[in-house]
Image (cartoon, rainbow, N blue to C red):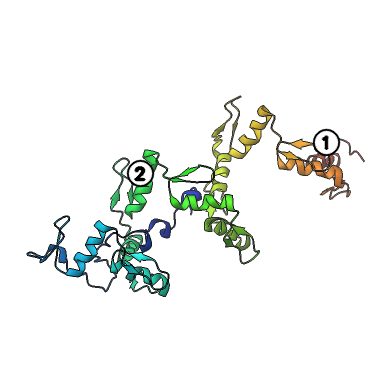
Amino acid sequence: MVTPTHEEDEQSEDQVLDLNPDQSDEKPERDTAVGSSVSPEPDWDQLPNSPHVCKTCGEAFGKKSRLEDHMMQHTGQKTYLCKTCGKGFKHSYTLTVHMRSHTGEKPYSCETCGKSFNQTSALTQHMRVHTGEKPYLCKTCEKGFKTSSALKVHMRNHTGEKPYICETCGKAFKQNSELVVHMRSHTGEKPYSCETCGKSFVQTSELTKHMRVHTGEKPYMCTTCGEAFNRSSTLIVHMRRHTGEKPHVCKTCGAAFKQRSALIVHMRRHTGEKPYSCKTCGKSFIQTCALTEHMRVHTGEKPYLCKTCGKAYKQSSALHVHMRGHTGEEPVHL
């Protein structure tokens, strides 16, 4: 049984893990992760009487190469260059990890599921999917997270911080991934395509939901009546039929609605907005379904057919009235 959730709030593991070595020159954690066959390096930084001392900050190192790496933090110099793409790095080990993005090498494998990673720190974070460990706790609400980056994003719910700003329209976001998706609304880019029908989407979650149209999968089931749905958001709206909840309230007249879309249409009655116009005669309507019905005046289309006598109508409501004549509720108008 699947509990209804807001799919829009879900994050994939790849969104949570900070796996890109190109974005940071911070020293990676010396990893002792479960499932890793790589022995941790000795901690040269802690060796007593080290001959290699940084003249800027006084930190000592057991190897000259480690001191040279460290000095780049002060100078900003990036002497380790990728021969494939030319990108520069301050540390040799960061270049080593970066090179795996070109070679595809993923030497660190999970012993539980076999998934491979290009860094030990990524494997460490992944293992928490299996163990359920959430070592990063929010001090405000005590919610736990598998990664520090996920906690950092969560904290913005409390602080209201939105550091990622769209240069086109100025809209701000809590996560860079949200900004990336938003930018596609300006560029029109839809990189995720359905292999069955060719329809394209701006994000993978939309493609996943769409695929259920083809597969018929309906994983979200109502515990009250057993009806199933292919989206959690549809189940949430459906549940309001049982509970009577109408959370979307008009601030002008107090009318309440089960769906936000219904409130938006209702508000146009107050504002007079009619955004959908007939290209033939110019008449405007507050919603698309009203425009669709109106267009039949011009096309002559009558899609609603009486199965008893064959008479056709432009609107379903007209067919319902007609059907009462056959049931004896009122005369049939032929």
What residue do we see at 24% from left, 56% from top? Answer: 74
Q: Name the residue under label 1.
A: 329
* Of the two numbered discs 1 and 2 in the rendering, the one whose residue sits closer to the viewer: 2
Q: What SS does tag 2 mark? A: helix
Q: What SS does tag 1 mark? A: loop
Is residue 304 positioned above or below 40 on the image? Answer: above
Is residue 142 positioned above or below 94 on the image? Answer: above
- Which quadrant of the figure contains the C terminus? top right
- Going by the numbered disc 1, the residue's amino acid type is Glu
Q: Name the residue under label 2.
A: 155
- Residue 286 in the image, given as x and y percentages of width and height: 71, 36
Tell which of 231 and 100 is nearer to you: 100
Residue sticking out furthest to the right = 334
Label located before the other in sequence (1 or 2): 2
- Image quadrant of residue 82? bottom left
What residue do we see at 62% from left, 36% from top? Answer: 264
